[in-house]
């Protein structure tokens, strides 16, 4: 009987443990993607980008004589329907580690097994299963450096080759059409503006990795903090949909390190931050919703407020912050240094709840990753594990001087600062909702709050918490 391969964030052929194991059985394979309520609910930009990933993967499968069956509805219901339509005897998937997915997957596994259907989950999304990295006392790591030391020398095995062929069933069940799913419906900024910045699919992800290793990793360490430079891998976008595996990235980084590339070790360390974030999500799922540290429980954050709205729209009057917020709106990504600065500005200068920022990022980032996003926000806000101390308030003007000395990044995304704004910056105005009422010729806004005043206000709130 056929096997159902339930694809989620693992839209690739190579280094895919679930796929390789299924192919080895020799049974006919029924690849399926289910638009279930959990997936339906994700933010506008990542949902749109997921739609592109699904379409690309479906094409890849078709070229191999297979298909990606698309179905919509609660996962268990859909799987049960497919089983009764096709006589499938088993369902396989790659594991997910966020609380909602874990609850769903556990329920699916129990129900299917009770019904006599083999249900099996596999590794593939992470280098290390979260429960396999333990401290000497048998707990999990709350601090990054010892986590890194625990895993840096581990053998993660060699990446698996892509299967040469996928055995097809004699008849295919019906499939939805991706266009009917309207994955871009909530992308008010217009998908056309964002599209040129995406590298969709497995082949594009591999090209990104190769380009990074052959041209950028050497100077990664020095160049990675300058947002105007194209100095990082940009693989977060592909890793989050599983268009590339972390093991493929790890191996390429290790090879570069062995060949003496100066920045390789640093790059590997960054990749392991992703592992650390998912380990935290697994062990402390409240990281996605609550101040992670108990002693931060009652911090008087401001909820959503007019200043935060201006922050979202790149209208704070702080050029580095605004450039970054506009970069995210137009391109679907934001440089890591800029993420730290806009996060610090929102939570400290504007005293606004990090969850307001978390939600906006979740709506705008095509590399949205629930674990990295939650860890990043709790880190900048100061309430997370291994977080930046609260009193360390980034100064966006000082940061701009240091990391954008020629103002290239700021001018690239703020038309008001250029005499001859280019097409890229103008695309931001085209992308904003009409209700924002923005014009390229408008005056650049005055700062929402003088930087020293914002800093003092943040420190006072922090001192009160300690009192
Ligand atoms: P590179 O510098 O090339 O790094 C290689 C890989 O390492 C990345 O692709 C990523 O998988 C991983 N990585 C690097 N830095 C981090 C980090 N700090 N935390 C976790 N993994 C990391 N990353 C996301 O993938 N999705 C998010 O939604 C996300 N939200 C963030 C929110 C905030 C407030 C902050 C401060 C950081 C966030 N990050 C997030 C982490 C980081 O900014 C991005 O992973 C990075 O900018 C991606 O660019 P790159 O692929 O070129 O990274």
Image (cartoon, rainbow, N blue to C red):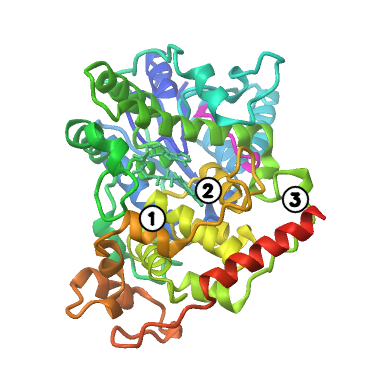
- Nearest to viewer (mark 1 / mark 3): 3
| Disc ID at residue 452 | none
Report if residue 184 is visible in the image. Answer: no
Disc 2/disc 1 C-alpha distance (Å): 12 Å
For label 3, the residue is 296
Looking at the picture, how far across and down is residue 417, in whole percent? 28, 77
Q: Secondary structure at mark 3?
A: helix
Q: Quadrant of ligand 1?
A: top left
For label 1, the residue is 334
Q: Magenta region: which residues?
A: 92-100
The residue carrying mark 2 has its beta carbon less than 8 Å from ligand 1: yes
For label 2, the residue is 373
Residue at position x 78%, y 44% in the image: 294
Disc 1/disc 3 C-alpha distance (Å): 28 Å
- Badge 2: residue crowd in 10 Å (few <14, some 14–19, many ≥20): many
Residue at position x 29%, y 30% in the image: 263
Disc 2/disc 3 C-alpha distance (Å): 19 Å
The vertical placement of 137 against 182, above or below, is: above
Q: Secondary structure at mark 2?
A: helix
Is tag 1's residue or tag 3's residue first in the polypeptide sequence? Answer: 3
């Amino acid at each position: 009987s056929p096997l159902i391969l339930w694809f989620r964030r693992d839209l690739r052929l190579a280094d895919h443990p679930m796929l390789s194991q299924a192919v080895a059985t020799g049974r006919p394979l029924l690849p399926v993607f289910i638009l279930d309520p959990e997936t339906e609910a994700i933010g506008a930009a990542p949902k749109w980008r997921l739609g592109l990933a699904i379409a690309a993967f479906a094409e890849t499968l078709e070229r191999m004589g297979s298909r990606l069956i698309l179905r919509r509805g609660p996962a268990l219901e859909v799987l049960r329907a497919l089983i009764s339509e096709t006589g499938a005897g088993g369902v396989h998937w790659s594991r997910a580690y966020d609380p909602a997915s874990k609850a769903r997957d556990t329920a699916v596994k129990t129900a299917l097994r009770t019904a006599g259907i083999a249900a099996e989950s596999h590794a593939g999304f992470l280098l290390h299963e979260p429960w396999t990295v333990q401290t000497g006392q048998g707990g999990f790591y709350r601090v990054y450096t010892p986590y890194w030391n625990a895993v840096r020398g581990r053998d993660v095995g060699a990446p698996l080759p892509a299967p040469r062929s996928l055995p097809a069933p004699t008849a295919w069940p019906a499939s939805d059409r991706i266009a009917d799913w309207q994955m871009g419906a909530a992308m008010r900024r217009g998908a056309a503006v964002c599209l040129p910045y995406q590298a969709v699919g497995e082949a594009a992800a591999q090209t990104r990795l190769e380009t990074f290793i052959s041209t950028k990793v050497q100077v990664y360490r020095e160049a990675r903090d300058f947002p105007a430079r194209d100095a990082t891998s940009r693989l977060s976008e592909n890793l989050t949909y599983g268009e590339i595996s972390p093991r493929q990235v790890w191996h390429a980084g290790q090879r570069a390190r062995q060949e003496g590339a100066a920045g390789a070790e640093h790059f590997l360390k960054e990749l392991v931050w992703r592992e650390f974030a998912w380990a935290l999500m697994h062990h402390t799922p409240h990281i996605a919703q609550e101040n992670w540290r108990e002693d931060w429980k009652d911090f008087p954050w401001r909820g959503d407020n007019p200043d935060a709205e201006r922050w979202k729209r790149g209208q704070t009057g702080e050029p580095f912050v605004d450039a970054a917020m506009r970069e995210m709106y137009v391109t679907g990504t934001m440089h890591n240094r800029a993420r730290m600065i806009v996060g610090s500005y929102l939570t400290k200068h504007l005293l606004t709840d990090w969850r307001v920022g978390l939600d906006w990022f979740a709506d705008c980032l095509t590399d949205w990753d629930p674990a990295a996003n939650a860890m990043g926000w709790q880190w900048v806000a100061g309430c997370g594990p291994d977080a930046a101390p609260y009193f360390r308030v980034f100064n966006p003007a000082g940061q701009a001087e240091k990391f954008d000395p020629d103002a290239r990044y700021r001018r690239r995304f703020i038309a008001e600062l250029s005499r001859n704004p280019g097409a890229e910056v103008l695309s931001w105005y085209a992308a904003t909702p009409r209700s924002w009422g923005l014009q390229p010729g408008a005056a650049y806004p005055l700062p929402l709050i003088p930087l020293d005043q914002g800093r003092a206000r943040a420190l006072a709130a922090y001192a009160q918490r300690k009192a």
